[in-house]
Image (cartoon, rainbow, N blue to C red):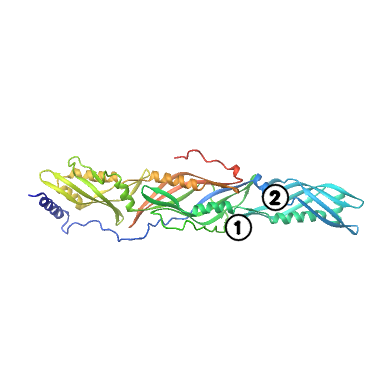
Amino acid sequence: MRPRSAVALLLAASVVACSRFGPVYPPRPAASEDPPLADPPPSRVVAHLAVTAAGLRESLDGAAPRTGEGTFPLLGSDRRYTWERGPLDVAFSQGRLVLTTKVQAHVALPLKSVDVPLDLRIEAEPVVSAAYAVKLQSVDVHVASTDSRIAFADKIGGVYEKIADAVAGRMKDFAFDLRPLLGGAYARLAKPIDLPVGDAHACARLRVLDVEAGPTVLADGIEKDVALVVAPSIEMPCPDVNVDAEPDLPPLSNVASVPAGPFTVTIPIAARYDELTRAMSAAFTDGKLYFSKDYPQIYLEKPEVYESQGSVVLKLHIAGPVRSFVDADLDGDLYLTGHPAVVDNELRIPDLEPTIETRNLLLSLKAATSSDSIRDQARAALRLDLGERLRDARDKLGDELTFGSDSGCFHGQVDRVEVTGIHAHAGYLRVYVAVTAQARITVPCGSAIPPPSTPPP
């Protein structure tokens, strides 16, 4: 009997053994050109904003008028006054910002001019507007003096009120702009972050949906939690987006509360099945995988992965000579099916088993032990190590969320990466990864907490 005739008879026998209706291979889903869909759930990137008292003092000192002048009526004529203030002192009391300073006033009184000290006290409530500006509302300015001469002039001409009005007007116009700093973070998050995955091209996206700000806390500075509501995803291949387009920062939404402390962002990783195919091909030598000790010349090649009815199907081409009680040259396809799972940051298919047709084909060749060997080899080869990919994502996200500017520093640190789920779809696999991180915005930049030299595992 010629070898090819023997193979034909063996294959025919296996078909009869499979089913009275013939072999039924796992059906393929309909072809689709659509990219893998990540469909991320909204998450919050929470950053603790701290404007230190020193930074606030510097900004307010530049905003408050240093000098002033005017006239007031006294005894039927206008009298002239000028004043000059000293440096501001910043304090906080009962939820309000308190600024105090000394003012030296020069007042023209009848018969002579006098120089008298004044006490200037400014109380206000700091808020962050929808335009990302720290502003002062409910501004109260108090001017007082223990000098009886200026007190008499104030009773007549309202000197205190004139000085207080000049200062209050400037303080109401004060605005500390946070837009450059938060805008920089927003622009970085909005643009795709390249993630090389072997010869594949992937990218992480943190599409910003909204920006929220919690209540203000006064503790040796202005502190509040700011949350960037994002829709994060990692997609393979990376979709075409206009990376040069400058995103518009949405208006700030002041909300009753923002979750404090470290935040968790759930990132879906959407990968096509050809990514798994490339990962499996890397385990083959020159495109072939020799797996059997009993049949050392049999090899597997041309792996192909697809989804069928919720399971992952692995199609392999088996070839090579069989030298047993009959001589034959194998040349056919094997089908193995299973369900994807993540074990210790490795994507595996632990229940991968031959289909009925494939198992019966191997049994008909008296290669039952090789059937288990094929299965075990396929299980071992069809593994995609997500650990390195997740480390890249962690490092990339940490780097992208750490930067400084003249207005302040934005520092982000990723603490933990955990795979929480995996689902098979017709054209791709979707893996859910939970990233736990923390972020801090510090103004001015010099007081930022430096990042650790080595990130935690």
Apparent side of residue 273 relative to residue 190 in the rendered image (left or right): left
Q: Position of residue 272 (x, y in %)?
A: 35, 54
Q: Nearer the viewer, residue 225 or 104?
A: 104
- Which residue shows up at 67% across the image and 47% down it? 58
- Which residue shows up at 20% across the image and 51% down it? 358
Three-letter amino acid code at disc 1?
Ala
Element class at badge 2: helix
Indicate the quadrant where residue 22 lies: bottom left
Apparent side of residue 184 relative to residue 85 in the rendered image (left or right): left
Q: Is residue 226 visible?
A: yes
- Which residue shows up at 16% across the image and 45% down it? 367
State the mark number for residue 269: none
| Residue beneath disc 2 | 62
Apparent side of residue 440 relative to residue 41 in the rendered image (left or right): right
Q: Residues within 10 Å of mark 2 (few under 14, many from 20)?
A: few
| Residue beneath disc 1 | 131
Give the CA separation, mark 2 to mark 1.
21 Å
Q: Is residue 261 visible?
A: no
